[in-house]
Amino acid sequence: MNILRTALIGVAMLAALTACGSSEPAHNDADVKFAQEMVPHHEQALTMAKLVETRTENTGLIDLANRIEQGQQPEIDQLNARLKEWGASTHGSHGGHGMVDTSELAALKGAEFDRKWLGLMIQHHQGAVESARTEVEQGSDPATKKLAQDVITAQEKEIHEMQSLLPQG
């Protein structure tokens, strides 16, 4: 009787493990939250980056803004594709870490614009890094965790670059 019971328990455990390996999603709630928050976050960065060319003559700032646009749009596309694949809404939280009030930027030009834009974008990037660190710690989807690590690496580098571009005085 014990042998039969042990065998049945073993078969049941094997079936459960096999089912878990094939039908469990690779993502979790942290992955979905990260993607839903990062999309509007990156969209705000794109909106901010588009303001630069007409408000400054600082070539370093213009170059940085162009790179932000080129880097973040593909990430938005990837995150939206994942959300769709997961059956999750692409219209999640429009808050998230580091969203900033950009209402003053449109009225500024020159060094005043540069200072305000850099300050806001540094804050914005710091929020993205914080969100990405949470994804790396709590997410389960390998591709999304890798994207989060890429966000950390790229945006920390850009934060240092922005700090060096801040006008003195």
Image (tube, rainbow, N blue to C red):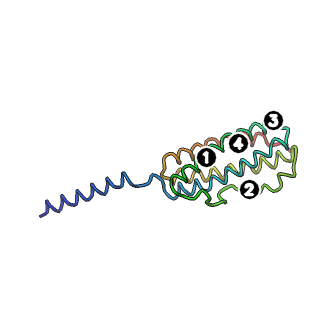
Q: Which mark is residue 100?
A: 2
In front of the other: label 3 or label 1? 1
Quadrant of the drawing holding the N terminus: bottom left
Q: Position of residue 90 (x, y in %)?
A: 60, 56
Q: Residue at x 69, y 41 (%)?
A: 158
Name the secondary structure under disc 4. Answer: helix
Which tag, 4 or 3, sits closer to the chain's start? 3
In front of the other: label 1 or label 4? 1
C-alpha distance separating marks 3 and 1: 28 Å
Residue for badge 3? 59
Q: Are marks 1 and 2 in contact (CB under 8 Å)?
A: no
Q: Are marks 4 and 3 in contact (CB under 8 Å)?
A: no
Which tag, 2 or 3, sits closer to the chain's start? 3
Q: Residues within 10 Å of mark 3 (few under 14, many from 20)?
A: few
Q: Residue at x 57, y 51 (%)?
A: 133
Query: For the residue marked with disc 1, what is the amino acid?
Result: Asp
Which of the 4 quarters of the picture holds residue 5?
bottom left
Residue for badge 1? 77
Q: Which mark is residue 69?
A: 4
Which tag, 3 or 1, sits closer to the chain's start? 3
Which tag, 4 or 2, sits closer to the chain's start? 4
Q: Are marks 3 and 1 in contact (CB under 8 Å)?
A: no
Query: For the residue marked with disc 3, what is the amino acid?
Result: Thr
Q: Residues within 10 Å of mark 2 (few under 14, many from 20)?
A: some
Name the secondary structure under disc 1. Answer: helix
Which of the 4 quarters of the picture holds residue 72?
top right
Query: For the residue marked with disc 2, what is the amino acid?
Result: Val
Q: Position of residue 144 (x, y in %)?
A: 53, 48
Q: Could you tell me if residue 86 is visible in this image?
A: yes
